[in-house]
Amino acid sequence: MTDEHVLRALMRHRRLTRAELATEIGISKPTAGESVRRLTERGLLADTGERTPGGRGKGRVGSYYALAPAIGTALAVTITPAGVVAECVDVYGDTVARATRQPTEPNQVAAALTAAVAEIRTGETRLAVVGAADPVDRATGRLVHLPDAPFLVGELDPAAILGPGPVIVDNDVNWAALAERDTAADFAYLYLDEGLGCAIVNDGAVRRGHHGLTGEIAHLLTTGPDGRAVRLIELFGELGLRRPGSTAIDVDRLLASPPAIHAILGTAVAGAIAAVIALADPQEIVVGGRWGPALLDHIRSATARLPRRVSLRPTRVTSEPVLTGVRAEALGRLRDLITAGDTPGRP
């Protein structure tokens, strides 16, 4: 436990002397010194070569220690319609390298992912966390093809590309929801963009279901034009709001459409929200994506007529929400790996 406290203190402060570590953690100086000795021998800490002022009545000179430079990094990767983004994150949470690729065809995604990671991978990468704009099979980490899914990326196995080391893969909406987790423990994150998705967060954890497909709302039956029942994803085709040759929603056209269309969409989304409330009982609904928050007034108006209602609010994380969640998970897992005593470069 002492060694873990020392490591986490240095993750927060980057460099400390043994005396400062003792004060920060609340342990004796000899105990701090023994911990530093053990961790240095294991290759987890290193003497920075910096010294405190000392001598002539100022006390002993102290040596500054920091986490070893070779302690390793983590990969944070997103695979979305906008392309592949890969970041190399160090134990302090800093992005030390970033690369992007924009494949134009589904069968190019694997090559784009390989190239982006090769560009930024330096030293020892301890693990990778991936967010993908497709459902993810919980058991295998492979992407799942569902009917009408707009972002098919081919037979992609991120673990085979990004290993060795642990590779954690999940749906992009789940990661975006985790980026909002500090504000509530029980909520549903409704993602309304070129694609449709929903993440259910209960007691602070994302609920994924047996196959990892919890929250795939595209095929929910809801209310369409003239009160007809329609699958949510099919409504956009009926309204002429799909991109040519794709089930992807044309967001620019949707936002420019007249208020009557927005009202129809608000009613349809409210139908999906009614199902989410009935099955998941969230404390609140968080609305994200490019067009969801823009239509929030229409969605609120329609949900006001539901028999059960919860508060709706726009997402608070608006800049790269998926990558924000992926990056936070990568950092947390990297730190846990290090504090658990996993020494880099050793079996």
Image: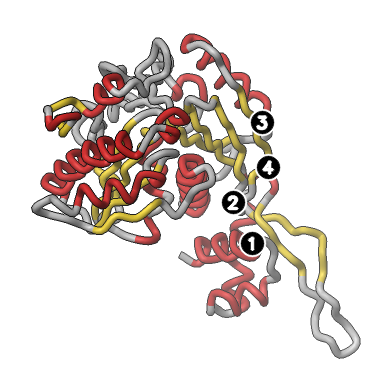
Q: Nearer the viewer, residue 121 or 165?
A: 121
Residue in front for this viewpoint, 93 or 20: 93
Amino acid identity at mark 2: Gly
The residue drawn where x is 37% and y is 61% is: 183
Judging by the rendered image, the residue that carries numbered circle 2 is: 93
Residue at 23% over, 29% down: 232
Q: Nearer the viewer, residue 60 or 233?
A: 233
Upstream in the sequence, badge 2 or badge 3? 2
Q: Is residue 216 left or right of residue 43?
A: left
Residue 37 bears which disc, if any?
Answer: 1
- Find disc 4 in the rendering and name its residue: 96
Marks 3 and 4, the one that precedes in the sequence: 4
- Tell me which label, 2 or 1, sits earlier in the chain: 1
Residue 286 is situated, as x and y percent measured from the top left of the image, at 33, 51
Amino acid carrying label 4: it is Val
User: Could you give the CA–CA distance between mark 2 and mark 4, rounded to whole angstroms?
Assistant: 9 Å
The number of numbered discs placed on residues in the rendered structure image is 4
